[in-house]
Image (cartoon, helix red, strand yellow):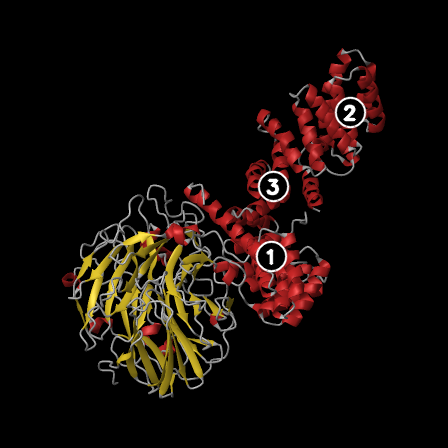
Amino acid sequence: MLRMALWSILSSMCPKDCYGDLCPGNIRSLSGAVRIIVVVALCVLTTVLLRAQDSRAAHASELMTTGKFFEAEQLWRQLLKTHPNDPVLHANLGVALAQQGKLESATEEYRRSLAINPNQTDVSSNLGIAEFKRGHFADTISALKPVLKTKPEDQRGTILIGMSYFGLRQYMLASKFLKIAVQDSPSNLELHNVLAQSCLWSQQYDCALTQFQNILSVNPDAVQAHMLLAQALDGMGKTEEAIKELEDTAHSSPKEPVLHFELGYLYYKQSEYDKASSELHQEILNNPGYAQSYLYLGDIALHSNDDKSALELLQKSLQLQARSRLAYFDLGCVYVNQGKPQDAVKAFQHAIQLDPSQPDAHYRLARVYMSLGQKKKAEEELANTKALHKKTDDTLIEKVSGDKVTQ
Amino acid sequence: MTNEVSRRNFLWMTAASTIGFAQGISTRNVKPIPRGKPSGLPFDAWFTDVAGTAGLNAPTVYGGVNRKNYIFETVGCGVAFLDFDNDGWLDIFVLSGSRLEDKLTDSSNRLYKNNRNGTFEDVTEKAGLIRHGWPSGITVGDYNNDGFEDIFITYYGQNVLYRNNGDGTFTDVTKEAGLLYEGDTRWGSGCTFVDYDRDGHLDLFVANYVDVHMDKIPKPGANPYCNFKGVAVNCGPRGLPMPRNYLYRNMGDGSFRDVSHETGISKAQRTYSMTSVAADLNEDGWTDIYVASDSTPSLLFLNKNSMLIEQGAERGVAFSADGAEQAGMGIAIGDFNLDGSLDIFKTHFSDDTNVLYQNDGKGNFTDATIKSGFGVETRYTCWGTGFADFDNNGWPDLAVVTGAVYPEVEQSLPNYPLKTPRFIFRNLGNGKFEELIDEAGPGIAASHCSRGCAFGDFDNDGDVDMVVINLNEPPSLLRNDIKNNLKWLKVLLIGTKSNRSAIGARVIAAYGDKIQAQAVMAQSSFYSVNDRRLHFGLGHNTHADLKIYWPNGLIEQFSHIEANQLITLTEGKGITKSLLPAAEK
């Protein structure tokens, strides 16, 4: 899903920028500019081969320019039998494979080429692009960072590294590269959007706000941008303004998926449970398969001491999205309230399985074990609770004071 | 984990955790639960601030007025009700700190002697108690069993032990008591006299809050943890090193010896320790110690034959109900549900509830915060607190004093004022409490930047008054003028085999169909000391029965004691005195 989303963003950029085989989908749909880039690269390679007086290389190159990649692949393979250590042949084979969508094999050939001659910026670029298309974001970054060292002005590399960090959820690093990319392509709204999200999720709210406002100044009806702007406002502690932004958006786009959930969530955060419930129910009407609406309605029911409703809503949420830590945690609390400790144990265990780093489930589980007289298990979970808190506290001390905690 | 990135995931992850970060103090970012319909019941206690007319005029200087660059300027200090001259009238000892930018040479702790007419006289100098510095907590007890209450005060710097000479003067005996320390400066915080080994001599538990190294402490706003709602503020406690706590054994010859290692105190997890209370919480006859910890797990040292074993998490008093660390500051100990066991109430930072832990009588606690009605209040940073039956109706109520820690925030965010009101949670008698502010009088509704507070009957009129520390202002003396004629009983314990102050004793009063437990403590509230005379409101009951659990294990019972009097009970000797000067209203 994430990869598809990134490809979608990149697709929209292709007409404006040249990314070689960066653009997703069929190579035949490449823009003319992209084709030229590929051709130029091949010409260089062919020249080298021509010097080796092998006419098959020229033919293979010609096949590439006419889009006959399978035939070209066969020729490159034949040539490699006689020149197995020629980095150019491996690189060209890689291109032919990549254009056929054989990305794994393509990356293997690029790597072979680079193993023989590491100083090939174009090959590194192609490797980075292929790895990106495979969704191997860390490998993309490894491949493209040397390219940027050699060619710091390389927009393609900058964007891809930024996108890869985004894909890895390293939003602070993503924003660092995407800010440069946006400067180079100021009219690219999609790029602004990814940068805005990177800023939002790395809690650079001022940056996020600026980017969303840029997007909305060009396209005031961009509902998604309004929604993300609201998130940025919320992140800055301006929850009331975020609510207003979403209320206005809901007025003009009442059927927009997830919008009513977002609004409901903000009301929930403000403890305005009646309003939150109303919006969450509206989201269910628009978008009945959205698990988190049921989850937060369940949470509200739990905190309103309506265990029966909470149980139904949380179970529905889990039917739709089985891997929800909060749903299992709340479910455990409901079971405790209902005097069903064994069920509570299972629910808390499930919550811990999904995210063992949260102390609350460990602590709740410990309390249930205590009530069941299972002292040893309780002590283990209490130890986990304390250890998680201590880790956080000690990390903070190291960060803020620079002191290594020894106790 | 799913690989999908949902836009809401970011916020969801935040919501999934019950702890709020990115500031120097843990708070759960809890919103108050809706208030129910008001009970409509009249509240017969009424508090008026009479500090000015009573002569309590010296301000408690503590750090900058408009800006505080270091955490030790913010925390403030405690106050004590004590009868230092044994005249049967409560005197008041008010701690006072310092200021970095313009040192005030006349700033000192103040001892106010009760003139028995509603006024006080400042006898600090005469008593030999002038001292400048950064005091934190106070504990009062007769450590040398000579019949006069002594005083120990923690400091950011050297703590001090004052021996009461019995003639209206005190002597600093810190050095001869062996309580001077060497090495890095410590920030003493909570402290309590406690006879942990039941030898009849009061030992001393001393907590430390934060290791502050002035050369290392980041400047305000230097990182996200030196920030409150976007405003640069002083750093800590989170992110600053944690010190450990100490236990000193009273050797019976005027000196103390550090027994932290052999008793287990030093083995406990380090925390940002604050108020410390000594009471027998698991009812096994040995006095335990509970320590409120700021932004870290609170500590419960259960006393097993002089070994102090930390069991806060195991007993349910270290965390919130969801296992979150809370900003523990003050502690009230009392029997809110009249089941004969001592429950714990602990105060926290704003955007979090305070917590009520219900005791099962064996030292196992359950979080009763929400069901008892305390979840309605999360607006204020809460400090001093205490259970007391303010209207004498037989059900212990609870008071809390409040005040923010960052004066600079108010200038940017008016919604976060520095000075905030006090509040009373009146006990409705059905397991629930109801919050009262204006209904409890102007002394409660007035806004101050308060810290410690102490509870006691300073005018001997049969009700419980309060004295409150206000930073950079004089204290408040909240006189309680009860509007009813309900009955009460005061009990003063004098130990003979037990420590003379009877610290650690538990008293159960039975009146009508009710029983209520109270404890004699040497510190509670926030860094403060209450009237050592226990006060029981009896409602319409004219008599009460008493059961005394002395610290050394002796249990004594006294029946059919008449209401509206102070009785003094001497261990093994019965009722030796029944006089409360000018007790008639």
- The answer to whether B552 is drawn above or below residue A74 in the figure is below
Tell me whether the residue at label 2 lies in contact with that at label 1, contact meaning CB atoms closer than 8 angstroms.
Answer: no
Residue A97 location in percent, x, y?
79, 29
Reading the image, the residue beneath label 3 is A187
Tell me whether the residue at label 2 lies in contact with that at label 3, contact meaning CB atoms closer than 8 angstroms.
Answer: no
Please tell me in which quadrant of the rendered image residue B571 appears: bottom left
Sort mark 3 into few (<14), some (14-19) or many (20+) by Cα contacts within 10 Å: some
Reading the image, the residue beneath label 1 is A377
Quarter the C terminus of chain B occupies = bottom left
Reading the image, the residue beneath label 2 is A93
Q: Is residue B60 visible?
A: no
Q: Nearer the viewer, mark 2 or mark 3?
A: 2
* Mark pair 2, 1: CA separation: 59 Å
* Amino acid type of the residue tagged 1 in the rendering: Lys
* Mark pair 2, 3: CA separation: 36 Å
Residue A303 location in percent, x, y?
58, 68
Horizontal side of B430 relative to B392 (left or right) equals right
- The residue nearer to you, when weighing B65 against B141, is B141
* Amino acid type of the residue tagged 3 in the rendering: Ser
* Mark pair 1, 3: CA separation: 59 Å
Which chain is mark 2 on? Answer: A
- Helix, strand or loop under label 3: loop
